Amino acid sequence: MIRVHSKRNAPRLAPPLVLILIYAGLIILGTIALKLPPATTSPVTWSDAAFTATSAVTVTGLVVVDTGSIYSGFGQAIVMILIQLGGLGLMTFAVLILSMFGLPVGFTHRLYLKEDLNQTSATDLLALSRMILKVVLVCEMVGAAILALVFVPEAGWRDGLWQAVFHSVSAFNNAGFALFPDSLSQWAGNPIINLTIPALFIMGGLGFTVASDIWRIRSWRHFSLHTKLMLIGTAALLLSSTAAFAMMEWTNPGTLGSLAWPDRLWASWFQAATTRTAGFNTVEIGNLSDNTSLMFMILMFIGAGSTSTGGGIKVTTFIVLMLATLAFFKRRASIHVFGRELELEQVMKVLALATTSILLIISSVFILLLFHEGDFLSIAFETVSAFATVGMSQGTTGDLDTAGRAVIMVVMFIGRVGPITLGFLLATRKPSRIGYPSGTVYLG
C-alpha cells in the first residue's frame, strides 16, 4: 500500500537542516567548477578544489594553493561568486530573486531566511533583505572604485579593475582571499589600502541589523540595544588591539621592526582590524611573537557581529559573557545594560555557544595533533582561524595532509553555519513531561 502525504502533513525538513544542506550543496558545486580545466592555469587535485570551495563559501580565506596564480580569471570569478553567496547567505539571494520577479515569498521561505539571517522574528525580512542588497552593492562598488586608484596604475585597466572588484568583494564579505601570494603586504604603508580594505570588512562585520539601524534610524538614542553594544564593542576592540599590537611587535624585525615608523602605525591598525574578521595581512603572520599570536587567537575567537559576514562567537556574545560575569560578582540576579534587561534565555544561549565553540576547537586541535606533526601554537592558531572563518595562517595550511585538510574543512563549515544552529538541529524539540525536585551542586 502506497502512503500519500497530503500537502498539510507532508514531512518537512527543519530550517537549520535545509540551510546546512544548501551550503553543503554550494560547496560541492564550487568544487566541481574549480576542478574544470578552464578554471585553473595548472592542474589541481580534488582536495585542493574542495578546500578552496569550502574556504570561499564559508568566507574564511585559508588556502592550499595560490589563488592569483593557480586559478585563471574564470576560476577567480568562481571563487568570488562563492564568496558573495556564502557571505550574504543563499536564502537572502533566493528571496530577493523571488520578490524581483513578483513571485510570492511563502512562510517556509521566510523561516529559512530567518535562520539564515539569525533573526528572532520572521516579520520585516523582505525589507531587511532588500536593505542588505542596497548596502552590499553600494559598499562594494564604492570600495572597488577607490581600490582601482591603487591597482589600475600598477596593473593596467583590465587587471587593475578586476583586482579592485575581487578584493572589494572579498573584503566586504570578510573572506580574506587575495590575488597576491603575500596578501597585501606590498602595500603595508599605502593609506588607500589601509583605510579602504578595513572600512569594507568592518562594515561587513558589524552585521546587517546594525547596518539597518544606521540606514533607517541614524540616531544613537533610538538605536537598538544590539546596535549600541556592537558599535561600542567594535570600537573598544579596534583601539585596544591596535595599541597592543604596536607595543608587542614594534621592535620585532619579522613584522613591524623592518618598517618605517609611519608604516608601523598603518600596519598595527590593519592587523588589529583584520584579525577578528577578514584574514588579510600586511605583515608576515608566521613571524608574530607568541604573545601576539595568543592575542590574535582571542580576537579571532570573539569575531565579528551577528548577522554579519564575519565569524567567531560574535562581539555581543563576548560582551554578554562579560556582563554576566560582572553581574555574578556584584550579586545581581539580572543583567542590565543601556536601560534594558537581558533575559535568562539569552544568557543561556550565550553560554551554550561559547561552550560548544571551545569544545569544538579543543577537539579539533587534539585530532590535528594526532595526524599532523607541528608546533602546537601554530596548529591551535590555524584551528581558531578556521572556526572563526578569519583565514589568517602561520603557514600550517599548506603542510596539512588529507586528514588535516578534512578536519579544517569541517571546522570552517561548522564555524559558518554556527554551532548553535547545529545544536538546535540535534536537540530534542519535545518538552519533558517529567518534573524533578531541585538540587544543589557546589561549584568553584
Image (cartoon, helix red, strand yellow):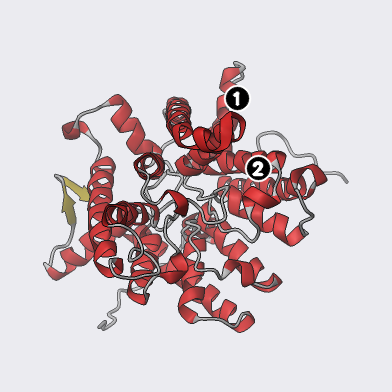
Badge number at residue 289 = none
Residue sitting nearer the eye, 421 or 30: 30
Whether residue 65 is visible, yes or no, is yes
Dot 2: within a 10 Å radius of its alpha carbon, few (fewer than 14), some, or many (20 or more) residues? Answer: many
Q: Residue at point 40% right, 61% down?
A: 300
Residue extending farthest left? 330
Q: Earlier in the sequence, mark 2 or mark 1?
A: 2
Residue extending farthest top? 102
Q: Residue at point 48% right, 60% down?
A: 392
- Secondary structure state at the residue bearing disc 1: helix
Q: Which residue is mark 2?
A: 76
Q: Which residue is mark 1?
A: 97
- Compared across the picture, whether 39 is left or right of 155 comes to right
Q: In the picture, residue 98 is in which quadrant? A: top right
In the rendered image, residue 99, in percent from the top left (x then y), is placed at 56, 21
**3D distance between C-alphas at marks 2 and 1:** 24 Å
Residue sitting nearer the eye, 280 or 180: 180
- Secondary structure state at the residue bearing disc 2: helix
